[in-house]
Image (cartoon, rainbow, N blue to C red):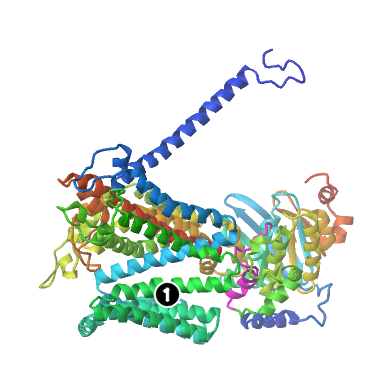
């Protein structure tokens, strides 16, 4: 018999086993191939976009100068300069940091603080500048007064059954009161310069937050001193710019949201950490090396890459005839506004629906059947093409689902009555919100489902109600998973183009949106638009550079969510 | 009867006032207990869908003693336990018939709120299930959800009574998940007694633990019976023999075959099937 072993000690593979093993190896080979295709497509994406945006094509293919006046000189000097000034110190520093856990931790914290607060400061300034800081200040003051009185009450008299629900209610009341009183207040403060309002919305909260933190960590006196220092810092920023006719707004924001918090983190780390403090210099070393390399490049007259990824691109507005002067600043602000508004609208709704479906909805009987039908439909909605959602947004904001105009007695109500139009920021945010809602719901459901039932049972066993169990056990454990889902949703939303085209959002605008009801604009639309520009540099360089800006924007949003998630997981 | 009424009133005030500690038992309630019936079930039937899990169970659980439920897997002993604090309400397909009386009050009456009921009946589960929070927050959880004041003293006292204080007193702020399995289970017991329940239900509390951790839990259960009525489900017969005062034997089909003093059950059971089970002929 062939299957019978020759002897008790014959453990060699026979033909059938060898054939099976061969099939196994073949299978693994195919799996590796699939992985490679996936990885290579990503690499190809970066090569194509990166070489176009940074002008690497000229290097790789040794192509002649694409534009007169931008002649690539021998590349080796440039390479040497950057190897020496940037790559060498950063590599040495990285190797040194990696030797020790404490150093790594401080380094990571320092990088997060420096670049996180820098990004935050840039976003706050950009949004404030676009929307008018006056508007933000009016809403912020009313919301903080309402919220502050509730929190103050709770701090003084302890929490009771009403303090919890009062928190969201107070925010809504603050918004409503601000909306009602907006007209007269805006009239009264309209003459104030932007920077005064920026002091109100950035310096005041920064001083309060940092003062509170240091009072908690050290002493009441330190807290007051910290708050005072932040205020003095902002004062210096104003004093240093205003007499010279420069608008102090940007500097006020930078001092309040970037310099002050970073200084606080730095001093706090030096005081509380006994080892690994060297990690603090990481971000400064990186920034310094880049500055040195760039200065040397200019001073020595070395011409390097013909990069399209320039400061001009991200700080100026669009120019359709001179590719070197094209900028996408309004589009960046527009994308942030749209996605931010969308997140505020869609995340509570999506997470709420997920909590209901997982924790409360009946799972058996007739109700269970309904739940199943809803579940299946939500999963299917996640696959509906985005252009169809654009149609939904169009019909909602153009025409109230094509029912308008509605006649109420002598008054005719159309979307315009409420300042609504399909091409405004709010319409874009709502439409993208519909689009990501199924993604948020499905991923949040997954996160809630992964909370062990044993924890729910333990909570019930201790006499917790269902709400207490959901609030204190289920949601805290599900938050990291929920955040992972929202990261996916954010990434999806920021790149969406088709629904915005359906809404008639302008593909090219020269100014940032002026608020939720202002004309929208978004970065992917500008990318889409510049791909058809008659001048070839737009179709290669600018479009690729703008794409990289879009990718960086997406990565920054993801990084924010990941930082929040990690902080939450550690606590 | 009179005593029952008085103690009922006392319980009512205890649960409504915040942060009452178990009073030191000075009078009749000694280790042997008073023998008063705390929980009584009458003709209890439980169905999961069409399957009957318990058949006509009638038994009385005495105060401040350890009552053990033993029997082979699937005999309904855990189901019985989960009827006592209405945890079966959470299973949508479960249907319960018959009476469960706590201090003479049927807990399946319309006017009984399961959440309020569970505040007076603590539960410890088969697998240690501390929340992924700090040790302190785990102990304080029950007090917080029941709106009782959380003090360091209550947390320390609960951990001491669960024989865990000395091992964790320096790491109250660390995650409960960093503890060993046996420590986690004692933390779950501390969590249950922190809210000062009247009855503690334990569903095979040591079955997932090693022998040393098991013996610690067993010592603890005997101590707890000085202050609390303990009902424990186990499939370890030696454990039941070691720690319980009364034993109920469930056999296949959700049927209560015999309920008596533990000594009687293990030395001279009335039913042949119980003897067969206890001597290891089946099960």
Q: Is residue A195 left or right of residue A290?
A: left
In front here: A389 or B207? A389
Q: State the residue in front, B83 or A382.
A: A382
Could you tell me if residue A391 is visible in this image?
Answer: no
Quadrant of image for the C terminus of chain A: bottom right
Q: Residue A141 in the image: x percent, y percent?
A: 33, 81
Residue furthest to the left? A410
- B265, B197: nearer the viewer: B197
**Closer to the camera in the image, A563 or A416:** A563
Which corner quadrant holds the N terminus of chain A? top right
The magenta-colored residue range is: B126-147
- Is A312 positioned to the left or the right of A416 in the image? right
Image location of residue B106, percent across then percent down: 64, 70
Give me the residue at 77% from left, 20% from top: A8
Residue B130 magenta-drawn? Answer: yes
Taking the image as shown, residue A103 lies to the left or right of residue B232, namely left
In the displayed structure, would residue A45 be above or below residue B238? above
User: Where residue A494 sits in the image (x, y, percent)?
Assistant: 32, 55
Q: Is residue A159 above or below residue A80?
A: below
What residue is pinned by disc 1? A260
**Residue occupying the far top of the picture:** A1
- For the point 72% across and 65% down, the residue is B186
Image quarter of residue A101:
bottom right
Q: Which chain does the numbered disc 1 sit on?
A: A
Residue B118, given in percent of the width and then of the height, sits at 62, 69
Neighbours of disc 1 within 10 Å: few (<14), some (14-19), many (20+): many
């Amino acid at each position: 018999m062939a299957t019978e072993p020759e002897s008790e000690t014959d453990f060699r593979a026979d033909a059938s086993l060898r054939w099976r093993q061969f099939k196994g190896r073949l299978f693994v080979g195919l799996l590796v191939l699939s992985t490679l295709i996936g990885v290579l497509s990503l690499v190809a994406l970066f090569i194509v976009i990166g070489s176009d945006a940074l002008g690497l094509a000229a290097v790789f293919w040794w192509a002649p100068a694409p534009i007169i006046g931008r002649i690539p000189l021998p590349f080796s000097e440039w390479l040497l300069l950057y190897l020496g000034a940037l790559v060498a110190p950063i590599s040495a520093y990285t190797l040194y940091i990696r030797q020790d856990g404490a150093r790594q931790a401080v380094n990571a914290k320092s990088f997060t603080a420096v670049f996180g607060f820098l990004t935050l400061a840039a976003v706050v300034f950009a949004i404030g500048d676009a929307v008018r800081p006056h508007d933000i200040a009016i809403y912020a003051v009313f919301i903080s007064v309402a919220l502050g009185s509730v929190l103050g009450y709770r701090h003084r008299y302890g929490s009771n059954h009403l303090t919890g629900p009062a928190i969201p209610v107070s925010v809504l009341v603050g918004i409503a009161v601000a909306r009602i009183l907006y007209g007269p207040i805006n009239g009264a403060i309209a003459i104030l310069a932007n920077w005064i309002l920026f002091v109100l919305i950035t310096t005041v909260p920064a001083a309060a937050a940092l003062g509170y933190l240091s009072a908690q960590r050290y002493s009441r006196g330190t807290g007051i001193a910290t708050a005072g220092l932040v205020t003095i810092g902002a004062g210096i920023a104003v004093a240093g710019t205003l007499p010279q006719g420069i608008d102090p707004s940007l500097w006020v924001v930078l001092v309040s949201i970037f310099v002050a918090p970073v200084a606080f983190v730095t001093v706090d780390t030096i005081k509380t950490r006994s080892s690994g403090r060297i990690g603090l210099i990481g971000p400064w070393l990186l920034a310094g090396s880049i500055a040195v390399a760039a200065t040397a490049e200019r001073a020595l007259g070395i011409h390097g890459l013909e990069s399209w990824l320039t400061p001009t691109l991200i700080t100026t507005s669009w120019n359709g005839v001179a590719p070197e002067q094209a900028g996408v600043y309004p589009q960046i602000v527009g994308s942030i506004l749209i996605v931010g508004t969308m997140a505020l609208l869609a995340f509570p709704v999506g997470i709420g629906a997920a909590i209901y479906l997982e924790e409360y909805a009946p799972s058996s009987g007739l109700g269970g059947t309904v739940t199943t039908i809803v579940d299946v439909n939500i999963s299917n909605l996640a696959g509906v093409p985005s252009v169809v959602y654009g149609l939904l947004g169009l019909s909602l904001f153009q025409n109230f689902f094509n029912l308008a105009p509605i006649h109420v007695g002598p008054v005719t109500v159309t979307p315009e009555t409420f300042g609504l139009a399909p091409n405004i920021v709010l319409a874009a945010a709502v439409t993208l919100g519909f689009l990501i809602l199924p993604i948020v719901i499905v991923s949040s459901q997954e996160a809630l489902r992964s909370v062990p039932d044993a924890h729910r049972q333990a909570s019930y066993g201790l006499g917790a109600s269902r709400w207490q169990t959901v609030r204190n056990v289920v949601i805290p454990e599900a938050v990291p998973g929920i955040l992972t889902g929202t990261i996916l949703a954010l990434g999806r939303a920021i790149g969406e183009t088709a629904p915005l085209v359906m809404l008639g959002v302008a593909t090219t605008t020269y100014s940032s949106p002026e608020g939720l009801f202002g004309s929208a604009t978004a970065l992917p639309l500008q990318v889409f638009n510049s791909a058809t520009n008659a001048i070839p540099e737009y179709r290669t360089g600018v479009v690729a550079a703008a794409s990289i800006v879009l990718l960086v924007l997406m990565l920054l949003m993801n990084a924010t969510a990941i930082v929040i998630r990690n902080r939450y997981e550690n606590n | 009867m009179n005593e029952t009424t008085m103690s009922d009133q006392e319980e009512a005030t205890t649960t409504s006032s915040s942060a009452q500690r178990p009073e030191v038992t000075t009078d009749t309630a000694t280790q042997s207990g008073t023998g008063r019936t705390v929980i009584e079930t009458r003709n209890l039937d439980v169905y999961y869908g069409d399957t009957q899990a318990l058949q006509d169970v009638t038994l009385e659980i005495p105060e401040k003693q350890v009552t053990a439920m033993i029997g082979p897997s699937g005999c309904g002993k855990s189901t019985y336990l989960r009827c006592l604090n209405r945890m079966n309400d959470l299973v949508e397909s479960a249907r319960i018939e018959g009476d469960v009386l706590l201090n003479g009050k049927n807990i399946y009456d319309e006017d009984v709120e399961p959440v309020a009921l569970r505040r007076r009946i603590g539960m410890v589960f088969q697998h240690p299930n501390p929340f992924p929070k700090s040790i302190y927050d785990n102990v304080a959880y029950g007090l917080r959800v029941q709106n009782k004041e959380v003090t360091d003293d209550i947390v320390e006292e609960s951990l001491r009574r669960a024989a865990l204080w000395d091992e964790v007193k320096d790491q109250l702020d660390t995650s409960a998940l960093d503890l060993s399995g046996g420590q986690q289970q004692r933390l779950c017991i501390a969590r249950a007694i922190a809210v000062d329940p009247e009855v503690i239900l334990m569903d095979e509390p040591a079955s997932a633990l090693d022998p040393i951790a098991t013996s610690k839990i067993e010592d603890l259960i005997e101590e707890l019976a000085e202050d609390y009525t303990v009902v424990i489900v186990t499939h370890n017969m030696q454990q039941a023999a070691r720690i319980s005062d009364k034993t109920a034997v469930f056999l296949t089909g959700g049927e209560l075959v015999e309920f008596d003093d533990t000594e009687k059950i293990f030395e001279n059971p009335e039913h042949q099937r119980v003897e067969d089970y206890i001597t290891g002929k089946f099960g």
